[in-house]
Image: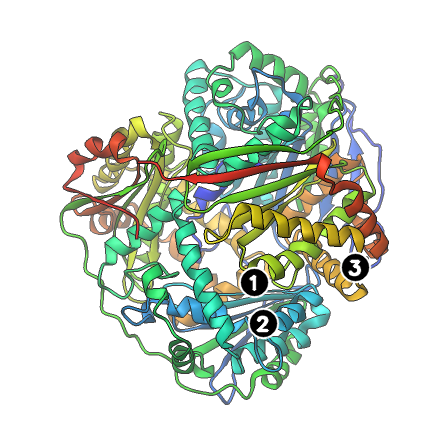
Amino acid sequence: MKRFLGLCLVWPALVQAGGFALPVERYELQNGLVVLTIEDHSAPVASYYTFYKVGSRNERPGITGISHYFEHMMFNGATIYGPKEFDRLLESHGGYSNAFTSNDMTAYYEDFASANLELVLKLEADRMHGLLFDPEVMESERGVVAEERRVGTDNDPYGAVDELLFATAFVAHPYQWPVIGWMADIERYMRQECLDYFATYYAPNNATVILAGEFDTKAALAMIERYLGDLKPGPEPLPVVRSEPPQQGERRALLRIPAEVPLVAAAYHVPGAESDDAIVLEVIGAIMNSGESSRLQRELVFKREIALDVYIDYYYRLDPNLIYFLLDVNPDSSTAVAEKYLYTELDRLAAVPVAADELAKAKNKLLAAYYRDLKTNNGRAQQVGMYDLWYGDYRRLFDVPDRLERVTPEDVRRVAAAYFTEDTRTVVTLEPVHAE
Amino acid sequence: MVSLRAVRYLAFFILTLTASALAAPQIHVPHVHRSVLPTGLTVLVAENHEVPLVSLHVLVRAGSMDDPAGKEGLADLTATLLRRGAGARDAEAFARAVDGVGGTLSTGSGIESSLVQAEFQAGDLEYGLSLLGSLLVQPRFDPDEVTRSIRQAVSARRQALDDPGRLADDQMQTELFRDHPYGHPTEGFAKALETITRADVMEFYARHWNAANAVIAVVGDVEASEVETMVQRAMGEWKAGRANAERVPLPSPVRGRRVVLVQKPAATQAQIRLCQVGIDRKSPDYFAVMVANTVLGGGFTSWLVDEIRVNRGLSYGASSRFYPFLIGGYFRISTFTKNATVKETIEVALAQVERLRAGRLDSATLVKAKNYITGLYPLRLETSDALADALLQLEYYGQPQSWIEDYARRIEEVSLEDLKSVARAHFAYDDLLFVVVGDRAQIESQLEVFGPVTVIDPE
């Protein structure tokens, strides 16, 4: 590959309603790597994100969790820097790194003093060029991931319910398996499978880099080109098929494990991030459960004391997805009663348009949360990267206040009526067992 | 569901204020305006215009260590009830007043102090302050809310049993400090909570929630010169009272080794804590201890992570941390592993402590640890809410604001000799309390080698 500073500039971010925007610039290298910069000289620090468009949705039975396993192996030795070198070099320069995996993507980041940008690029370029997959390290890291699964799923009631819920609600689409993977798969990934996975999904044309903080954009781009420009593009990854057939009847699953507090989770199929309904679902989430005056908190937690707490799980995803309502059920009440009152609230949402002041309250909550996510270089880079992943256009991030403003009471009613239906519902109940 | 590499187990410096070094950026803390109102309320204001939000945090010098014996959980319950109705607003109306403008407001207690943490959009600063003032000055403690909050707190204690890591931390605190005022979970004991009355809550509030016993920090997208007047307007009527003096004895260290096995039947993984009382916030060894602890158990390249996680794949997380208080403190190693490898994991952890005590470190290790601490420090103060909490802590511990700017230098000054000396003095090995939460049938026999084992049921 030629070294060439690709130059598909530049969509300067515009000031939007609410008067807030970020000075994002967009570039694309010849090898397909997209680079987004957010220059900001308020402090001599920076954050560097790499989003790879690979997550558990790209997996298949037998290698579930391999995307997440990669997230660990990316710290365990590459071409130039061997095992342990990545963290040792970064930490000895006062930097911090971590990563996370979702159904849709894997993201890596470094927070560092801006003088250390070149070191970060060396480290990131090295592991984008190739991983070692040392057999001994692979074995040890399997143990680490197995412990992560034990702590987050096998010995955590919420993790266990979440896993069973997705496994029950989806019968065809890859969202049916957990991001961490099934234990038997964690124990068996082969080295060759890892090498194949890397060649496809860790290529520059499947990645987006976001740099936020103190740097000179032109100089930083030249440096990025120098270290990442010679990477070869990989094959186009296979598209993920939207294979999930419509659900035609409520599904229920029961989890009987040692616990003190019963849980009940009710999930509904909803569209992915691309849908205009996605932001309406966020508004619904805020109406129902953001703050102690929200409907589920007020009715279920404080007024009736049926639930000890309520959570709503809803993320933007690339493919049609779930929203679910999870209740920590008061042991003096019952999951059946808790379910009944949850459905009463959902039916009310679908029947009666929300009052103007209640809608405004939800929007204010979401607007504040939107700003909260943009407080740090890390947060700004992450949000820009996420929106770029979901929409192929980071500028959608700056539309959020406007799109939020446009949500009407009728939108809320319509969306609730469309998706919160008994036949598309999946319910998981955790019934405590007192083991001895 | 998003899965993180290790974030949860790396919260190792929350109580610690660190700073900058050669490799690290200079710390630029915004100018902090400090004033004291006629009532004795200390007001700290700093500007940060990154996003149009403002953090309003209030610290009161009263925490779970001020719970009367038999009323464990009273401090936290009082803090909870402050937001459940104030002035003309009942609980629901107060929550609606906060939520309506998109604000957040939480209240709660730690061991040493209680906190109110609120955040509002910048345009709502004055409104937010008035809500805060109402909460502080005119809490209602409606009888129905008191009984409801007690029921909820009791249920929450039961629910805590479903989180093995949380259970381990709670039991560790109880077993390490025993009869000392630090020796119970902040959230209290279920049996004690059930005995608390509205009169108890009102008495606790009257004694501790006073202006002279409190500090407010306002940090964010504000005009600093205008804030003090607004605070005076919003809470100038707050009863002055007086500041709490130091009021607990130094906790006694554990002598010898002792193991507490907390039963968690059918668990496939055990939660492990090794602990001992530790240095206080003003210890002359503070900075050297922070550096030494980073070598042992801070970050992804610490000895604990390296030997337990990286070399052996025994756990997803391993860390050590000091919790320095105004008086005393504690030191804790945390990790977890599958049932079959509990003994091995503890042995590996102990070996790292021994290695530190034996002074087997070189200057490269020292430099890495220092750079790591100083490099991360600016990031820990990057947001308004983090800076607000840091400023409140300085006030609480009676430390000057220059402490922040000086931190990097004081970390840099730590020498290899300092490290070796604090390693022996402050990193316990022969005198340790082990708390393990797990399935007795699978792990008890593995624990006997470490000391006499007491088996308990939680709470």
Q: Residue at x 42, y 33 (%)?
A: B316
- Residue type highlighted by circle 3: Val
Is B294 drawn above or below residue B109 in the view shown?
A: above
Position of B3 with respect to B352 (left or right) is right
> Mark 1 = which residue?
A302
Residue of label 2: B91
Quadrant position of residue A36? top right
- Say whether residue A232 is visible: yes
Give how far across and how far down residue B17 sits, in percent.
44, 58
**What is the crowding at mark 1: few (fewer than 14 residues within 10 Å), some, or many (at least 20)?**
many
Residue at position x 76%, y 38% in the image? A273
Q: Quadrant of residue A316?
A: top right
Report the chain holding disc 1. A
The Cα–Cα distance between marks 1 and 3, rounded to whole angstroms, is: 21 Å
- Against B279, residue A230 (above or below) is above
What is the chain letter for disc 3?
A
Residue drawn at the location 36% of the way across and 28% of the way down? B314
Local SS, label 2:
helix
Image quadrant containing the N terminus of chain B: top right
Quick one: A76 or A305, which is closer to the camera?
A305
List the residue tagged with mark 3. A354
